[in-house]
Structures are given as C-alpha cells and as structure tokens.
C-alpha cells in the first residue's frame, strides 16, 4: 500500500461511515458474523486481537471477501506487523501508543489509536494518526464528542463502545468522522446479524441522503 492508497483508504472509511467491530471466543463464529455483516451491506470490518486466532480470521476475510478488513485491540508494533502481514488495511489501538502509530505509518496503512482526553487526542493526532478513536463513547455521550471538536475541529474522531441503531446518528450529528458498531451488531444468529447490518446500512444511506439534500 503506498501513500496515495493510504489516503484513499482513509477517504473510503469516511464514506462508509461505519466500522463493524467483531469480538468473540470462537474464530469460526466471528468469521460467520463478518460474512453476515458484509452480506447486510457493511463493508468495513474490524477483527479484534481478543479473538482467538484473530490474525487467521483477518487473513480468511481478506482472501474470501472484498471487505475492508482491519485489526483492533492492537497494543504492540509486533502485533501490528502480524496483522498487516495478514492483509489488514487499518489498525485500531485501545490506547495512544507511539510505537504502534509509528509502525503502522511506516507500513503506509491507516492507524486509529484510542484516546479520551483532549491531551490524548491531540498527542495521537500529532504522532500522525489518520483518525482518533474515542472510547468509551456511550459513557461519554455525543455531547462530549462535540465538546472535543470545539478546540480540535481538524481531528477526525471515531466514537467506539455502546453505539447502536438508536444513537449512531446522534454521534454523526455531533461531528464523528465515522462510528464503530460492536456488540449490538452481532446477535449470535446469522439472520439477526444480517438484519441488524441491513438496518445500519439503511441508516447510513438515509444520513448521506439527508446531507446531500441539505448541502449548500
């Protein structure tokens, strides 16, 4: 992936608006959840390293789908390398780790470190982050996101944790560049996970249409 592709991927993530975050104890079930989500119309998938055999799941998805596949819960540069070698196109970290950020940038992939305070957000951005994850979003609320963007309007924020069909639009309205939808999306049943993915996709398309209608 070259620098132009990295920027293009960042733009594509913005256009998708949603990253589906998958956790679980069974790698095969996580893979099937990902397939249901992709079938439902969401094409950006994050597999967290808390999943047993997560790197293998990432590789399976890269090889068998056209989804944008990334890795989450990445805490070391070594793990970032493993995920990127498996085909991950973006790396999400729970913290603002300079080692992770620098390594992913060296590999010309998209990096999304985690932060909560204004100091952490600015540090991540100054280290070169493409986006900054705000976690735990549901406990902080959309207003917190809006408040952060007041003095830091140029930093694209990605709220994560507790995002559902009921509050997703509120975070986008508050200024989120995109959102991560996790545990709510995976229902433990292929058809229900598919339905929820379709619901989120519909909300995304309706939101985009609303922006088009009201754009100057």
Image (cartoon, rainbow, N blue to C red):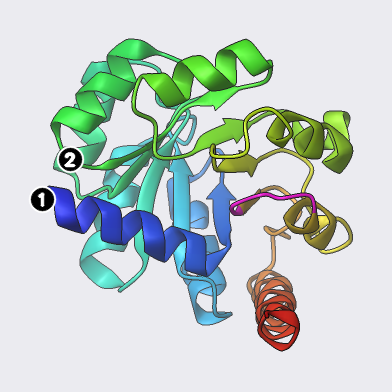
Q: Is residue 203 above or below residue 115?
A: below
Extreme-left residue of the structure: 2
> Which residue occupies 80% across, 62% down?
169
Q: Which residues are magenta?
A: 174-178
The location of residue 21, given as percent across then percent down, is: 56, 49
Which of pointers 2 and 1 lies earlier in the amino acid sequence?
A: 1
Percent x, y of residue 9: 31, 58
- Mark 1 highlights which residue? 2
- In reply to whether residue 10 is colored magenta, the answer given is no
Vertical relation: 216 (above or below) 136: below
Q: For numbered disc 1, what is the local secondary structure?
A: loop
Q: Residue furthest front?
A: 216
Q: State whether residue 71 appears in this view.
A: yes
Instruction: Work out whether residue 95 can be spotted.
Output: no
Q: Which mark is on residue 201?
A: none
- Give the CA separation, mark 2 to mark 1: 6 Å
Q: Is residue 81 above or below residue 27?
A: above
Measuring from the top left, give residue 119's x and y in whole percent: 61, 11
Q: Residue at x 24, y 42 (%)?
A: 109
Label 2: few (<14), some or many (≥20) within 10 Å?
Answer: some
Q: Residues within 10 Å of mark 1 (few under 14, many from 20)?
A: few
Kindly identify which residue carries mark 2. 108
Left or right placement of residue 17 versus residue 59 in this view: right
Q: Position of residue 23 (x, y in %)?
A: 57, 42
108 vs 19, nearest the viewer: 108
Q: Give the side of residue 18 with respect to residue 68, left or right.
A: right
- Quadrant where the C terminus sits is bottom right
Q: Are marks 2 and 1 in contact (CB under 8 Å)?
A: yes
């Amino acid at each position: 992936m070259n620098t132009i592709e990295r920027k293009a991927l960042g733009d594509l993530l913005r256009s998708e608006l949603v990253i589906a975050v998958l956790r679980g104890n069974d790698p095969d079930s996580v893979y099937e959840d990902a397939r249901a989500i992709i079938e439902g119309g969401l094409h950006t998938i994050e597999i967290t390293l808390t999943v047993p055999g997560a790197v293998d799941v990432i590789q399976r998805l890269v090889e068998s789908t056209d989804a944008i596949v990334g890795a989450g819960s990445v805490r070391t540069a070594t793990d970032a390398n493993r995920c990127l070698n498996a085909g991950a196109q973006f790396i999400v970290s729970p913290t603002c780790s300079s080692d992770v950020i620098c390594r992913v940038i060296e590999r010309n992939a998209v990096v999304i470190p985690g932060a909560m305070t204004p100091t952490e957000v600015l540090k991540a951005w100054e280290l070169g982050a493409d986006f900054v994850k705000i976690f735990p979003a549901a406990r902080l609320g959309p207003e917190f996101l809006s408040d952060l963007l007041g003095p830091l309007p140029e930093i694209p924020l990605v709220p994560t944790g507790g995002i559902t069909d009921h509050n997703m639009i509120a975070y986008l309205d508050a200024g989120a560049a995109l959102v991560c939808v996790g545990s709510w999306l995976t229902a433990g049943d292929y058809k229900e996970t598919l339905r929820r993915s379709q619901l989120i996709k519909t909300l995304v398309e309706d939101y985009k249409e609303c922006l088009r209608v009201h754009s100057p």
